[in-house]
Image: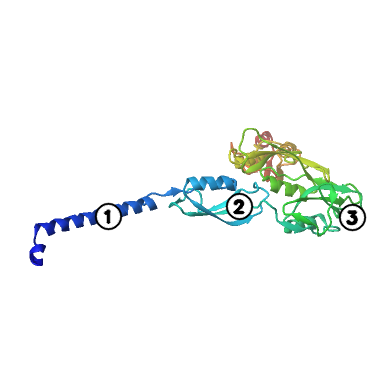
Amino acid sequence: MSVRNYIFSKTFFKQLVLAASLTVVIMWGALKLLDLYTLHGRGIDVPELEDLQLEDAKELLLEYNLRYVINDSIFDTNREKGSIAMQDPEAGTEVKRNRTIYLTTVAVLPEMVPMPDLTDLSRRQAIALLETHGLTVGRIEYKPDIARNVVLEQKYQDGIIEAGAPIAVGTRINLVLGEGVGENIALVPFVIGMAPQEAARILISASLNLGEEAHWEEEETKDLRVYKQSPDPLDEPVYLQAGSPVDLLYRSAESFDFEAYLGKLLTVPVPDLIGMSPDEVRITLEEMDLVIGDETFQEEAQRDYAVVVRQEPPFEAEERIKKGERVNIWYAPPVEDIESEEQN
């Protein structure tokens, strides 16, 4: 059979159709296998790894068919050693199978720094120098010495620590300061609403120590803020012997509205002073932690015999004013005196 006749024969046509069909099947199967391998059209949501221990994170990534690389390690005293501090991509990001997740872990061994020499520095200078070395102030003690608030000794736990000694970043250093001549007292700062570390720093800066710490029952422990302090300087200034403790009670800002809470603590209702005498005004404003501003008397009005006819800010129901704000007052003679003069 000639080539021409073979090409136009039924046998050649059947073989051609069979070859084309086989090619389509092979291509279709290859594409399906490729889809299965790459999970085409289907992604994987990256799991939340932060705060997990590295071994737990490894197991979780294996379940998700994801890989990992530890690309950094940091020292953080607020996190558990060996846990995951950061991840890239973030949790919830959709990725393909076998994607590499880059992890930053919390160092198991802390970074070491040389202990600075704080002797003869002022309290403020010593605190600043400790912070530049990644250290913090623990407790403050006082002992008799003519140099007030000057560092006499630097301690780690119960012993003296010499300058230059290696010490872990984040370590608390206790300071022994001079009492100075005369009574050494400190004004208690207002720390409600502050995070624990910030509150401790403010107390130390005021020559006071952090006392007992407690946490509000049955609440989240994330984003803690100071809910109450003892003693509380809100209503009137409180002075303590330098080095005295201040106790703090914490609540979580995730489950408690600190903005509204502080708004109520630091404000009072606008008082209704209309008709009050100057003495009544003074007593009322003092009780509400407000200040008498400008006092204006009409020509006929006398301090011993006058009443309020106008105030700024004006009284409005449910309006509040910050404690310590000034209230301006305008006085006039009592109404009965004005009516009596008009009748005469």
Counting from the top left corner in percent of width and height, residue 82 is at 63, 49
User: On the image, numbered disc 2 is attached to which residue?
Assistant: 105
Observer-nearest residue: 235 or 175?
A: 175
Q: Identity of the amino acid at label 1?
A: Ile
Label 3 residue SS: loop
Q: Nearer the viewer, residue 96 or 299?
A: 96
Residue 294 in view of the camera? no
Along the horizontal axis of the image, is 115 left or right of 259? right
N-terminal of the two: label 3 or label 2? 2
- The amino acid type found where label 2 is placed reads Thr
Residue 111's mark? none
**Disc 1 marks which residue?**
26
Q: Position of residue 51 (x, y in %)?
A: 59, 46
Q: CA distance from mark 2 to mark 1?
A: 47 Å
User: In the image, what residue occupies the spot 80% across and 57% down?
Assistant: 165
List the residue tagged with mark 3.
147
Residue 26 position within the rendered picture, expressed as x and y whole percent measured from the top left: 27, 54
